[in-house]
Amino acid sequence: TYIITETLRRGHTVFEPTAEAEADWVHTIVTGAKDNRAFLESCTPGRYNVEGNVDARPRRNANYGGGPLKFFDLLAQWRREGTLAGLQLSD
């Protein structure tokens, strides 16, 4: 809701992440991803290990590796900066 509210308050109706911001976030995910390959290889085939095909799930599809508190801090800092860094606003 913060992004929608700020987009409208700034006189715009559309927001999109920039290509650079998207690439930066993918880098954050990849570098912070937990190496759980051994666990996935030992699991019964299913949704989490792509039916036993561990190599089919690239690390860029991993969860944020810093944990929830660090993620919430990251969002709070981004909001405090107030620039909507990484977003492109338009009409």
Image (cartoon, rainbow, N blue to C red):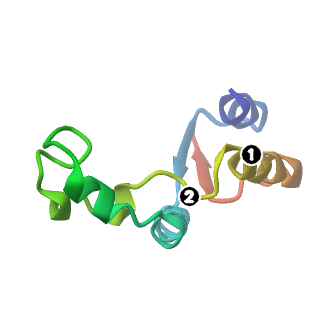
Q: CA distance from mark 1 to mark 2?
A: 11 Å
Q: Secondary structure at mark 1?
A: helix
Residue matched to label 2: 65
x 52%, y 48%: residue: 16
Above or below for 34 versus 68? below
Q: Residue at x 16, y 47 (%)?
A: 50
The residue nearer to you, when weighing 53 against 27, is 53
Q: Quadrant of residue 14?
A: top right
* Callout 1–callout 2 Cβ contact below 8 Å: no
The image position of residue 70, as x and y in percent, is: 73, 52
Residue 69: mark: 1
Task: Check the image and report above or below for 27 versus 78.
Answer: below
Residue 78 circle label: none
Quarter of the image with the N terminus in it: top right
* Disc 2, SS: loop
At which x and y percent is residue 37?
A: 30, 64
Q: Is residue 13 above or below residue 24?
A: above
- Give the residue type at disc 2: Gly
Q: How many marks?
A: 2
Position of residue 26 measured from the top left corner of the image (x, y, whole percent): 46, 65
Q: Quadrant of the C terminus?
A: top right
The residue at the point 76 percent across, 38 percent down is 10
Residue 64, position as x, y percentages in the image: 54, 54
Task: Tell me the crowding category of disc 2: few under 14, some 14 to 19, or many 20 or more residues within 10 angstroms, Cα based.
Answer: some
